[in-house]
Image (tube, rainbow, N blue to C red):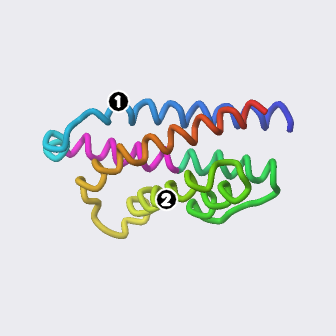
């Protein structure tokens, strides 16, 4: 890998870690105030979206670099990472629903239920943090 490729992976990892820190800062808000604050709903929705996108992008680069595999969707990326051992199969399966969190707002398939967004934080955040830790070790390789 060229130094430029390595620098790109490190930059992507730093971006993911920054997004997760911002999402973690929003995770302490209880449901009632969250439902009353449309701005915060949109912020959390966007942070979830960007975090899933950044995680998938970084995983895709690792899959191409280490396994010459190029998945076509976010869900495929997570599953392929599990199949190759980049991440555990259990983590891969837990991350697949996160692809839907990213796709729904992007494709505007339906109105986003703020209750669903709020309930996704304690589920998605630990999984994305685990993924970030795994990727930090991989990127350093």
Q: Position of residue 83 (x, y in %)?
A: 69, 59
Measured as percent of width and height from the top left, residue 116 is found at: 28, 56
Compare marks 2 and 1 and give the one earlier in the sequence.
1
Residue with the mark numbered 2? 99
The residue nearer to you, when weighing 37 against 100, is 100
Q: Is residue 114 left or right of residue 82?
A: left
Q: Dividing the image into 4 quarters, which one contains the C terminus?
A: top right
Q: Furthest-bottom residue in view?
A: 109
Q: 111 left or right of 11?
A: left
Taking the view exactly as shown, the residue that stands out farthest to the right is: 2
For residue 83: magenta?
no
Measure the C-alpha gap from mark 2 to mark 1: 22 Å
Neighbourhood count class around disc 2 (C-alpha, 10 Å): few under 14, some 14–19, many 20 upward: many
Q: Nearer the viewer, residue 4 or 44?
A: 44
Disc 2, SS: helix
Q: Residue at x 29, y 60 (%)?
A: 112
Q: Nearer the viewer, residue 62 or 103?
A: 62
Is the magenta region chiefly helix, strand or loop? helix
Boundaries of the magenta span? 38-52
Residue at the spot x=25%, y=59% of the render? 113
Residue at image position (82%, 57%) is 68
Q: Which residue matches tag 1?
A: 25
């Amino acid at each position: 890998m060229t130094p430029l490729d390595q620098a790109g992976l490190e930059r992507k990892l730093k971006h993911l870690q920054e997004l997760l820190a911002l999402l973690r800062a929003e995770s302490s808000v209880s449901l009632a105030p969250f439902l009353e604050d449309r701005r915060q709903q949109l912020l959390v929705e966007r942070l979830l979206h960007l975090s899933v996108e950044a995680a998938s992008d970084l995983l895709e680069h690792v899959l191409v670099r280490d396994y010459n595999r190029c998945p076509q969707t976010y869900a495929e990326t997570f599953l392929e990472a599990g199949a190759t051992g980049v991440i555990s199969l259990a983590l891969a399966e837990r991350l697949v629903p996160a692809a839907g969190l990213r796709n729904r707002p992007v494709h505007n398939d339906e109105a986003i239920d703020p209750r669903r967004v709020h309930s996704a934080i304690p589920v998605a955040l630990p999984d994305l943090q685990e993924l970030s830790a795994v990727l930090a070790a991989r990127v350093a390789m």
